[in-house]
Image (cartoon, coloured by chain):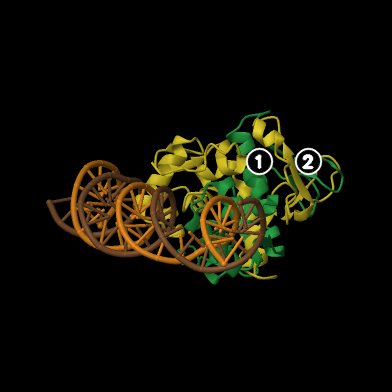
Chain colours: A yellow, B green, C brown, D orange
Amino acid sequence: MPHRPFEGQNCSIAGALALLGERWTLLVMREVLLGRRRFGDIQRHTGVAKNILSDRLDTLVEHGLLEHRGSEYVPTRKGVDVNPVLVALMQWGDRHVYGEGGAPRVLVHQACGHDADPSLRCSHCGEEIAARELKVRPGPGASPQQQRDPLLPAA
Amino acid sequence: MPHRPFEGQNCSIAGALALLGERWTLLVMREVLLGRRRFGDIQRHTGVAKNILSDRLDTLVEHGLLEHRGSEYVPTRKGVDVNPVLVALMQWGDRHVYGEGGAPRVLVHQACGHDADPSLRCSHCGEEIAARELKVRPGPGASPQQQRDPLLPAA
DNA sequence: TCGTGTGGTTGCATTTTGCAACCGTGGCAT
DNA sequence: ATGCCACGGTTGCAAAATGCAACCACACGA
């Protein structure tokens, strides 16, 4: 099992990265969520070595993001929920790696049937949230130290 | 310089991960975007080894996500734009690592002043997008092979 | 029954990471 | 001016993760 120095920070980002942040893991999730669920397909489309893929699939199953059914790995709810992470990475890559008009893939909102360029909206005021408009404050699960700490603006 | 086997997939997710997917990098970005911009602060709050931190900061500067000004590392636009990635990871962690009501941190939408639980909205119909409602199709920058490939549903 | 494809595992070389010790600069109290 | 400490790193070496190629077992069809 891999070394996970990220836990114990009482931080959801670190907690997520403890699992998803291992090399190849998010690319494996990309494949599975794209619908490619067989070992060989995932291996070919990502380029990951077979032993590593084997390891990653095992830990994803172990943590309940995937289920191993016959020769397929199918995502659970917990696995499907990593979709927004992939969307965020994709949007960053579209903008900053491939330029305008160079996007390798485009998202489609199945419910309305149109291309979607999803953006983050505030659950309170409903407005779009720009990256620099986000702050952060201690939540219900914050440690005493985090409560005290003057948490600073994000961005 | 690290080994980056992710490039050349013509995929924005892989392109983003080539840079952001290295161990510690997203945690470093978390710190910087939280407002902690000095070497020592970042080191203490993440727990990353000094040599690794040094390396990560260098490559982040090299790729234009950060600028090194005096003794501070300040995010550029490109750097601020990773915020949505952190938000997505945080939401996943809130939901699946720390349970309901256990969130270590809560987001605040600075513009309206209230807590925000940002959700993805469709740019076309304006509705909230559930993770399983996203499909994908080849974009303008898709390779011939990707054009041909029957791109499958996401989720 | 022989070959081929799929889904892995094993062993070993290479790369990345972690850790501790060290170094140079600047501030500041003596 | 001298000594001492903090800060921002760098260096060297050990440990862990990764990459690669060879191998194995099973299923299926010719």
Q: Amino acid at mark 1?
A: Gln
What element does badge 2 sit on? loop
Camera-side residue: B53 or B15?
Answer: B53
Camera-side residue: A72 or A65?
Answer: A65
User: Measuring 67% from the left and 36% from the top, which residue is drawn there?
Assistant: A146
Q: Please give the residue where the numbered disc 2 appears in the rendered image.
A: B116
Q: Chain of mark 2?
A: B
> Left or right: where does residue D10 sit relative to residue B88?
left
User: Measuring 53% from the left and 56% from the top, which residue is drawn there?
Assistant: B21
User: Measuring 67% from the left and 52% from the top, which residue is drawn there?
Assistant: B36
Q: How many residues crowd around disc 2 within 10 Å: few (fewer than 14), some, or many (20 or more)?
A: many
Q: Amino acid at mark 2?
A: Ala
- Establish if B154 lies above or below B139: above
> Left or right: where does residue D16 sit relative to residue A138?
left
Camera-side residue: A40 or B32?
Answer: B32
- Establish if A41 lies above or below A79: below
What number is the disc on residue B91? 1
Q: Position of residue A80 (x, y in %)?
A: 58, 42
What number is the disc on residue B58? none
What element does badge 1 sit on? helix
User: Measuring 46% from the left and 41% from the top, which residue is drawn there?
Assistant: A60
Task: Say which quarter of the image contains residue A70.
Answer: top left
Q: Position of residue A94 (x, y in %)?
A: 65, 64
Q: Quadrant of the C terminus of chain A?
A: bottom right
The tag earlier along the polypeptide, 1 or 2, is 1
